[in-house]
Image: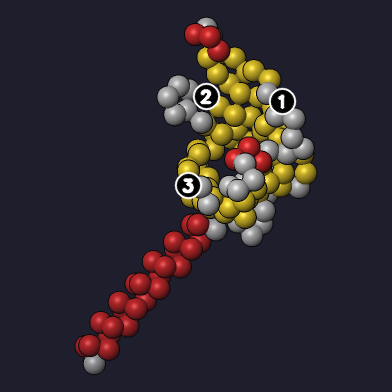
Amino acid sequence: MRKILIITLLSLTILGCSKGNNDLKNNIPTELIGKWKLTERYTNSGGGDFNWVEINTRLEYDIWFKTNSDVIMKSLGENCEEGSFAVIENEINFSFPCGESTIPIDSLSNTTLITNISYIEYELNKYIKVEN
């Protein structure tokens, strides 16, 4: 009887952990779903003060987050632009055929996404939603 109880408790613990991890990975904010266009970058241009600088990528959209966790990132090139994503805590984890990356979300609303792309210097990217 004791063995059955231990096996049952272990099974529930393992299943509970597994379910928790899946819930965490699928925690995609509804505001994130849609097509986003990069419009500005907050950067220290030329060693001066930090300012928002207008960006024009000349693309219809730069990132498309889909409800099924698929993502298209136009700036990565045709052999690498389609992948998947997960939102864990306040970070977007990308997985593409050419590699993986994690980008923190600085702020998110129904119309604006600001990501923190500070690798060497402090920089933010501002996206505007162009389509749901």
Q: Give, as a three-letter code, the residue at label 1.
A: Asn
Which mark lies nearer to you, 2 or 3? 3
Query: How many C-alpha atoms fall within 10 Å of the one at disc 1: few (<14), some, or many (≥20)?
Result: few
Q: Which residue is drawn at 55% across and 18% down?
A: 43
Q: In terms of sequence position, does the residue under pointer 3 or pointer 1 come before the other?
A: 1
Return the x and y of residue 62 as percentages of the image width and height: 68, 38
Q: Name the residue under label 2.
A: 123
Q: Which colour scheme is used?
A: secondary structure
Is residue 113 toward the left or the right of residue 6 in the image? right
Residue on which disc 1 sits: 56
Q: How many neighbours does mark 3 have within 10 angstroms: few (below 14), some (14-19), or many (20 or more)?
A: few
Could one spot residue 17 in this view of the protein? yes
Q: Which amino acid does label 3 sit on?
A: Glu
Compute the Cα span from label 3 to label 1.
25 Å
Q: Where is residue 115 in the image (x, y as percent from the top left)?
A: 56, 34
Query: Judging from the image, what secondary structure is the residue with disc 3 in?
Result: strand
Q: Residue furthest top?
A: 48
Q: In this view, does 78 lie to the left or right of 99?
A: right
Q: Which of marks 2 and 3 is nearer the N terminus?
A: 3
Vertical comparison of 6 with 69: above or below: below
The residue wearing badge 3 is: 100
As measured in the structure, the alpha-carbon distance from the residue carrying label 2 to the one carrying label 3 is 20 Å
Picture coordinates of residue 13, whole percent (x, y) = 34, 72
Earlier in the chain: of badge 1 and badge 2, it is 1
Nearer the observer: mark 1 or 2; the answer is: 1
Image mark for residue 115: none
Quadrant where the image shows the N terminus: bottom left
Q: How crowded is mark 2: few (under 14 residues within 10 Å), some or many (20 or more)?
A: some
- Residue drawn at 50 percent across, 57 percent down: 25
Q: Foreground: 124 or 20?
A: 124
